Amino acid sequence: MDKQTRDILEILGEDARVSHAEIATLANMSEKDVTGTIQQLEKAKIIRRYKTVIDWELAGEEYIYAIIELKVRLERKEGYQAIAERLYKFPEVRSVRLLSGEHDISITVRGNSMKQVAFFVAEKIGTLDQVYSTATHFVLKTYKEDGLILDEPEQVKRLPVTP
Amino acid sequence: MKTVPPSGIRRFFDLVSEIDDVISLGVGEPDYVTPWHIREACIHSLEQGETSYTSNFGLIELREEVSRLYTRKHGVYYDPGTEILVTTGVSEALDLAIRTVVNPGDEVIVVQPSYVAYIPSIIFAGGVPVSVSTKMENDFKLTPKELESAITDRTKAVIINYPNNPTGATMDRGDLEAIADVIVEHDLLMISDEVYECLTYEGTHTCFSSLDGMRERTILLNGFSKAYAMTGFRMAYALAPPEIISSMMLIHQYTMMCAPITAQIGAIEALKNGEAEMQKMIREYDRRRHLIVKGLNDIGFDCFKPKGAFYAFPSIPDTGLSSDEFAERLLNEEQVVTIPGSVFGETGEGFLRCAYAASRNDIKEALERMDRFLGRL
Ligand SMILES: Cc1ncc(COP(=O)(O)O)c(C=O)c1O
């Protein structure tokens, strides 16, 4: 990856709303080149999409999250892809990961109440043919998500003038 | 003592403390907290009870890491046993170096605009500072001619600092080789303050002692303050031939004893595992560099594009104000802190030091305020 591409990705990765003109300044490129490079990155699916980090709790929406670890039975030919697809098509399922170790797959489920999440797991996930056990862990508090610390970020305490 | 005035930066510090809603481009240190892995290593060492003095030279493991770094990066070998001294900041290393090489009456050449500590340190050691001025039209590089013009029979050493505080200038290998020739010809020593080494955005940094014949004539100073955002740790080192290091060590052992052990442990961690986080900070400084230089030029300053460190050093448009008046009014009227160029030597008059170790939002806001201020002048 060249330096300018990395610059663009790092800048947008932190704040997707920075204008192309500002990126051009920061990365020392022309605005036209920035726009061209971003289009290429989008086309190559390196940039998947632009999303907003929302504190739903603060907005008054009481979401409940649970991490569910699954043990699965693999069917011939199909491998893990088939079960992953069945899982990720549920909108309640926010993430699906294949794991090494004791469990095979970990998913994150979001709902409006513990009861709703529990029923979803029991009815939709636990009943899938390939799934032979589930372990549900409700999330009590999230401190850091996808690289973003959710508490107030740490500020350096500097004097206002130093040599 | 009375001949050395307090740093001009200090005066601004006092002014600022009385004003609210200040945006500071006056800070000569990173706006990052030290990377967590480094702090964590220090915390762990405290839990393990590592709270004693260390060897006067510093922990051998740290000296070995430094030695490996210079071999790997610059192809110069320094013996961890006799040629590396760990100090409390480049500040201490600088003082030791000057006290070691300067006899009363010896002249030391300082390349200005320069970091504020050089001239006072020379005077404290009984030496005589002699200034040479670099110029914006030469990209603030020292030319061999300028250097020669300042040399006399009493000249003992030269202090250079690239990447430079306050100008952001760098010198490439060819530029430095021309200086090295003058050093040999006049049989001088070089004190090279390379504390901003890692913050080089264009080209690659050449360490002075890696030049032909310069290892024996160089006291190289470098540290952790800027590259690893570790200013408060007070961690640095001096690299020099054994005769020089042993003299510096003599002063160090009686005045400082040793650098703090916790900070030394943090420094080891920084050298072993700090590269990725350092590079990330440097990439961000580089973006801010483009932002501030373009911004300053757009609002009417004439700003040299710095190649290293984290300072922009624009020349002030001709408004009849001295750089001191300009900076003071900018502070009082728009609450933006900058440092007047005159603080860094007479030749800095007419310039302003704007540190871009500040968030992009602060830089943008400061530029808007400066634009407003210029509009009113
Ligand atoms: C050129 C230069 N040398 C040395 C220092 C002091 O560094 P340290 O924190 O290692 O004492 C500074 C700090 O601003 C500097 O700019």
Image: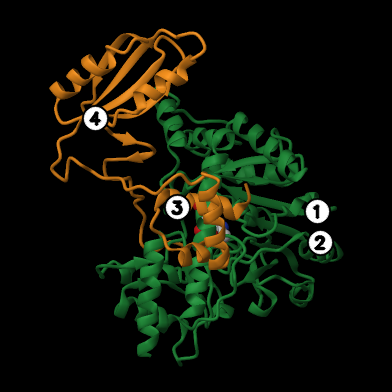
Chain colours: A orange, B green
* Vertical placement of residue A115 versus B73, above or below: above
Q: Is disc 4 surrounded by few (<14), some (14 to 19) or many (20+) residues within 10 Å?
A: many
Circles 2 and 4 on the same chain: no
Of residues B223 and B86, which is closer to you in this image?
Answer: B223
Q: Which residue is mark 2?
A: B177
| Secondary structure under the numbered disc 4 in the rendered image | strand
Q: Nearer the viewer, mark 2 or mark 3?
A: 3
Q: Nearer the viewer, mark 1 or mark 3?
A: 3
Chain for numbered disc 3 = A
Is residue B12 at least partly visible in the picture? no
Q: Amino acid at mark 1?
A: Leu
Chain for numbered disc 1 = B
Q: Which residue is mark 1?
A: B211
Q: Amino acid at mark 2?
A: Glu
Residue A67 at what x, y percent from top left?
29, 22
Q: Which residue is mark 3?
A: A12
Chain for numbered disc 2 = B
Residue A110's tag is 4
Residue A157 at what x, y percent from top left?
34, 51
Relative side of B73 to B254, left or right: right
Callout 1–callout 2 Cβ contact below 8 Å: yes
